[in-house]
Amino acid sequence: MLIEDNIDAKLSSQDVEEKDDEFTHEDRLWRDDGWTAKVIKNEDDDGWAVAMYQDGQSEPALVGPWTMGRDKKNPKPLDAAAFSTLVKTASEVLRRHEQHMHAMLHKSIDVMTDDGLVKVKLDIVADEDEPYATLSAQDRYGDELASVRVQPNFKLTATSAGNWIDSGFKSPR
């Protein structure tokens, strides 16, 4: 990654704990609309990078290259248009991450049975101390047919769902 190991890339706790009504519009630091952009030196080369932080977060949501200024030594100053684009990009990165996490924790598969379509769902609870998952089945009307607690590493496939249905919804081993 570009600069994740660069200590300057992280905002100090003072930088993160800004008041909601305080805005900063400086060449290398821009705070507005719940976001902070900080232009930082890329220690790996002669270039610059920008780190985007969402208010209240100590880790950046986005780190990327930043354009050199006209003097080819200093970074181009932040401005409203650039900040707006960075906010949009960082928000999209967070949204995609949330979608990915949701897809990893909530899976479903449709199985055709003699009684009709059954939707089998696996919902993983990623608790740090005791993670688990719930395997459930619904008929075509959304009525729950069964629900059992399973290990969080249970693999939901068409075969495992079909076997569970065929077993009369007995807890899988």
Image (cartoon, grey):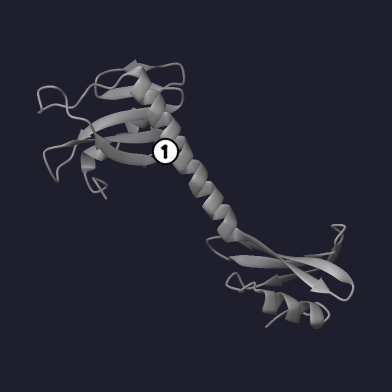
Relative vertical location of residue 59 with respect to residue 115 in this rendering, above or below: above
Position of 60 compared to 145: left or right? Answer: left
Residue that numbered label 1 is attached to:
57
Tell me if residue 56 can be seen: no
Q: Name the side, left or right, on which 73 lies relative to 11.
A: left
- In the picture as drawn, the residue positioned furthest to the right comes out as 115
**Where does residue 105 sit, x and y in percent of width and height?**
59, 59
Q: Residues within 10 Å of mark 1 (few under 14, many from 20)?
A: few
Q: Is residue 30 above or below residue 124?
A: above
The x and y percentages for residue 27 are 24, 20
Q: Amino acid at mark 1?
A: Gln
How many dots with numbers?
A: 1
Q: Quadrant of residue 106?
A: bottom right
At 42% across and 35% down in the image, what residue appears? 89
- Residue 110's quadrant in the figure? bottom right
When the figure is inspected, residue 126 is found, relative to residue 78, above or below; the finding is: below
Look at 29% across and 39% down and name the residue there: 64
